[in-house]
Image (cartoon, rainbow, N blue to C red):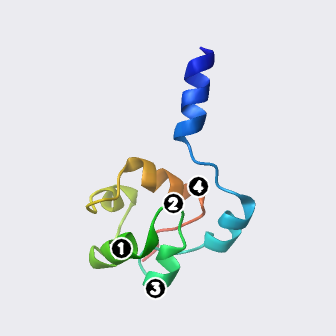
């Protein structure tokens, strides 16, 4: 049990309060590439990919972007990113 808990903690990046406040409210449908690149684990290349696959109706749409997997989506959600029209 103890090993599983540590493995889970290592697999879930910790998002600091300052990261959350600086990325909270970033709308994946309207944000600039610079804003998207601020999201944890995204950077300029994935930000470009996110922009090319807009619009998003839901988080499942985001998971279909090449290079964006479920874990990345979870991190974006925890950091306060949104999907709005």
Query: Could you tell me if the residues under marks 2 and 4 are in contact, i.e. CB atoms within 8 Å?
Result: yes
Residue 54 horizontal side relative to residue 28, left or right: left
On the question of residue 82 being in view, the answer is yes
Q: Earlier in the sequence, mark 3 or mark 2?
A: 3
Q: Residues within 10 Å of mark 3 (few under 14, many from 20)?
A: some
| 1 vs 4, front mark | 1
Q: Which residue is mark 2?
A: 76
What whole-number distance in Å separates the C-alpha atoms at marks 2 and 1?
Answer: 16 Å
Mark 1 or mark 4: whose residue is earlier in sequence: 1
Mark 3 or mark 1, which is nearer the start of the sequence? 3
Question: Which tag is nearer the camera, tag 1 or tag 3?
Answer: 1
* Callouts 1 and 4 close, C-beta under 8 Å: no
Q: Which residue is mark 1?
A: 45
SS at circle 4? helix
Left or right side of 61 for 36: right
Q: Residue at x 60, y 61 (%)?
A: 79
Mark 3 to mark 2 CA distance (whole Å): 15 Å
Q: In terms of image quadrants, where is residue 38?
A: bottom right
Local crowd at mark 4 within 10 Å, few (<14), some, or many (≥20)?
Answer: some
Residue density around tag 2, few if under 14, some if 14–19, many if 20 or more, within 10 Å = many
Which residue corresponds to mark 4?
Answer: 78
Drawn side of residue 82 relative to residue 29, left or right: right
- Residue 40 image position (x, y, % from top left): 54, 63
Q: Are marks 1 and 3 in contact (CB under 8 Å)?
A: no
What's the residue at 35%, 52% (across, down)? 69
Q: Please, which residue is most extreme toward the top here? A: 1
Residue 79 sits above or below residue 25 on the image? above
* Secondary structure under the numbered disc 1 in the rendered image: helix
- Horizontal and vertical percent for residue 6? 61, 27
Q: Which residue carries the number 3 mark? A: 32
Classify mark 3: helix, strand or loop: loop
| Place of residue 62 in the rendered image (x, y in percent of width and height, measured from the top left) | 35, 62
């Amino acid at each position: 049990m103890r090993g599983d808990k540590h493995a889970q903690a290592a697999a879930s990046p910790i998002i600091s309060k300052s990261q959350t406040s600086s990325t909270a409210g970033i709308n994946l449908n309207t944000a600039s590439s610079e804003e998207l690149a601020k999201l944890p684990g995204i950077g300029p290349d994935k930000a470009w990919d996110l922009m090319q696959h807009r619009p998003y109706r839901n988080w499942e749409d985001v998971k279909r972007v090449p290079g964006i997997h479920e874990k990345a989506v979870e991190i974006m959600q925890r950091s306060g990113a949104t999907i709005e029209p």
